[in-house]
Amino acid sequence: MFTLSITQQIARITIDRGEKRNAVPMAEWANLERLVRAANISEAVMVVIDSADPASFCAGSDLSELTQLCHDPLKRRKFRGAMESVLGRVRAINKPSIALVSGGCFGTGLSLAAACDLRIARSDASFAITPARFGISYPKDDVSRIMQLVGPGNAARLMYGCETITGTEAYRMGLVEIVDDSAELGREMLDRISLSSPSSLNDLKATMAGRWGVNNRFDAAFGSKDFTTGIESYKRDKSHAKISQG
């Protein structure tokens, strides 16, 4: 249900199980992790996660399989471990990661979107975290990430009340950074990112992630070819602008 396509600019992971609203079977988490790993080491500038079905980004875990966990403690731990592993892998991607959300984005689907750096959604997209309806909880890292994005109060609102909110409300809350109802969701931002230096994107991602050695990377960047090329390009653009104005 997960596929990976790679162009020069974008490693795109697409969720494609529309007949089940893109609900994720347990066995598919390992496949997703394999694709995330491949996307991360590719030459693409960014990683995009989207859906082949405009009516649903991801409905979360496949509820029809969760009943298997009722009497099998070992399977419960494996299930949680598989989800934690892939979501941790998404958070650790070393290049910009963007979730493009249309339709429903629920439960673990929301965790997958939240694991990305940036979320772009249509105004009529739907978001909800509903484990409390089923008598279960939510993994610690996922709760922490939601709280980081929207704050403790809004996290409580979503998780305690199992409220479904629109993309517009998710934007107001801070769960979504951009609302986009254009014909091609996220295209403007993806084009903007594609114009940036890949090495700069990598260094900025490392800095935001709090990784070691980022100050050394900052210093070293001034001696890079990307910096020289960027300065020359800026000077040319500025010169052309003056000629046009004159």
Image (spheres, rainbow, N blue to C red):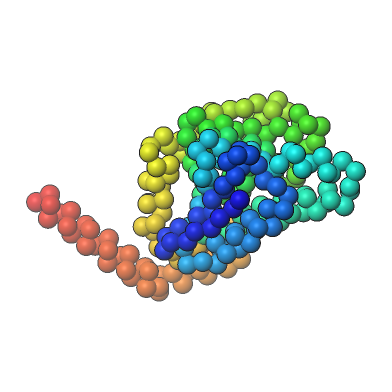
Count of numbered badges drawn on the protein: 0
The picture places residue 238, in percent across and down from the top left corner, at 21, 57
Left or right, 203 with respect to 65, comes to: left
Q: Residue furthest front?
A: 19
Left or right, 202 with respect to 114, comes to: left
Using the rendered image of the protein, determine whether residue 84 is visible from the camera's viewpoint.
Answer: no
Instruction: Judge whether 219 appears above or below 85 on screen.
Output: below
Residue depicted at x 65% and y 58%: 31
Where is residue 229, by image quadrant? bottom left
Instruction: Judge whether 52 appears above or below 129 on screen.
Output: below
Q: Residue furthest left?
A: 246
Left or right, 11 with respect to 89, comes to: left
The picture places residue 213, in percent across and down from the top left corner, at 58, 68
Instruction: Judge whether 128 appears above or below 233 on screen.
Output: above
Residue depicted at x 51% and y 49%: 98
Front-lying residue, 3 or 37: 3
The picture places residue 236, in percent across and down from the top left corner, at 22, 62
The picture places residue 201, in percent across and down from the top left corner, at 46, 60
Where is residue 154, by image quadrant? top right
Residue depicted at x 33% and y 70%: 228
Front-lying residue, 186 or 56: 56
Where is residue 90, by image quadrant? bottom right
Using the rendered image of the protein, determine whether residue 104 is visible from the camera's viewpoint.
Answer: yes
Left or right, 208 with respect to 193, comes to: right
Residue depicted at x 24% and y 62%: 235
